[in-house]
Amino acid sequence: MTIKTRVAPSPTGFVHLWFLRTALFDYLFAKKNKWIFMVRIEDTDQGRFVEWSIEAIIKMFERTGIMPDEWPSPYQDLWNWPYIQSERLDIYKKYIDKLIEEGSAYYCFCSAERLTEVRQQQTELKLPTKYDEFCRNIPLEDAKKRVENWEKYVVRLKIPKWEKLVFHDLVKWKVEFMTSEIEDTVLLKSDGFPTYHGAVIIDDFLMKVTHVFRWEEWLPSMPKQILTARALWIELPYYAHLPNVLWIDRKKLSKRTGDVAVENYLKKWYLVEALINYLAFLGWNPKTTEEFFTLDKLVERFDIADVHKAWAVFDVEKLNWMNAKYIQKTEINELYTKLVAYLKEYESDFYADVFVRHSREYNLAILKELQTRLIKFDDFIGLTWYFYKEAKLRLDLLINEKMWITWLDFAKNSLQIALDILNETKVLELDNLKNSFIEKIKSNSLKNWQVLRPVRVALSWEEFSPWAFELIMIFWIDESIQRIKKVIEHI
Ligand code: GLU
């Protein structure tokens, strides 16, 4: 038997970070054994349908490298069947009609007003609110006549009374449900579209899905799905309900509580490798102290037995930490290529007007300097602006009482020393430069930082920046001289 996992996103807006984690687990499970990973688009809720959302889903897979084997990609000619539910309406109708004929489902003609009224009465009587089965016993012949007369209807599944359903989940183990708690579920809506419950079981069966990883919130829908499958005489796939994810403040990771759109993380240019690595650990742990896993390594190590039952916590600080580590590990030319791609896509003005006007060596030297401090790419411009723009002089920054630089003329003298050294430097080389400074500082009976701090400030005009020597090595002699000269003139 071929094993096949699937995700079934609903295109209702941006792609949720949580969905990426679900897809990742499906993918890891499938790829580990060279099985199949499939994507189906569940767009039966036309009221919530957002057109660009399908494209966003496709883009997410392409960007993250979690590539499905079967999916509705416009670039893939593997069209075994439509992977989008709205293109499969005839199929659902055929199966649902069969359920009606066999007496497992029935036409329901109740109006929305009537249903609201029933609910209100139940609420007043403090009863559970559910459909009162008003149409359950209408003889099929009568019901068919009403349908022929264009009466509006939905199709409901007959839920058996007082039955205990026992279900075995790959993560949650044994789960039990009582059918008395469930109402007669709508399978087909009055607009001719199936409901989620109506379509999902039929599709998983026809598409030969064997394993479904999905989030815990779907667990309560299991009894409806078990009963739908039973009525259809089909076997259900195995399910793994993945633990929910909370924000660090223990609030649920929902659209309301914060940034949960995958696109936003890609926009801030978290490295895909870091994002995937971090998400993999939300609810899974390979029981090792090792924290860095490439996608290939995740595939190799993934084991469903290591998926937790307990809820996971999403901590953006930890993600930042991991991203910074990935930046540090990335080979500098590769990192540069990624930076260029990021700037082109998200900072196109800066890229065209500033970045490309400097040489590759210059830009690369800046990135190299930043590699140990950069957390994510969208911090790049803020951290390096002084390399690209002329700084506004802030003479107050030159004073630093702790370093006994208490008046501007003192700083001016230090800058003059630096200027003299730079003027004499013919070939710029880090060790020689350091030696020249140290000697000259000594002969002037000063402390190193009494010269190096003003130089650093004069070059960057930032309270915090790389050290003076590193700045000089990036700016090179002429630009350093020019910047220092300008300050001396201003003092
Ligand atoms: N369409 C559902 C969703 O958007 C899929 C649920 C499932 O995996 O069965 O989450």
Image (cartoon, rainbow, N blue to C red):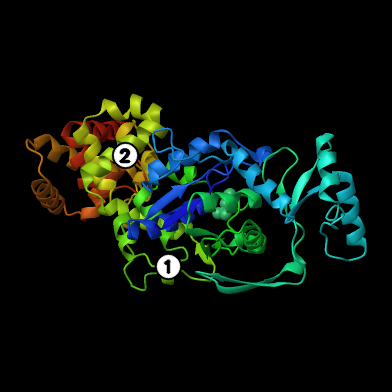
Q: Nearer the viewer, residue 112 or 353?
A: 112
State how far apart marks 1 and 2 are (Cα).
Answer: 36 Å
In this view of the protein, which residue sits in the foreground, 38 or 267? 38
Q: Secondary structure at mark 2?
A: helix
433 relative position to 185: left or right: left
Within 10 Å of disc 1 (Cα), the crowding (few <14, some 14-19, many 20+) is: some
Residue at image mark 2: 339
**Image quadrant of residue 125?**
bottom right
Label 1: which residue?
304
Q: Position of residue 8 (x, y in %)?
A: 53, 49
In the picture, which quadrant includes the C terminus?
top left
Residue placed at 85% from the left, 40% from the top? 146
Residue 53 place in picture, x, y as percent: 54, 38
Tell me the SS state at disc 1.
helix
Q: How many marks?
A: 2
Q: Any mark on residue 269, and which?
A: none
Q: Is residue 227 above or below residue 108?
A: below
User: Of the residues shown, which amino acid type is indicated by label 1?
Assistant: Ile
Q: Decide: marks 1, 2 in contact (CB < 8 A)?
A: no
Residue at screen point 52% across, 71% down: 309
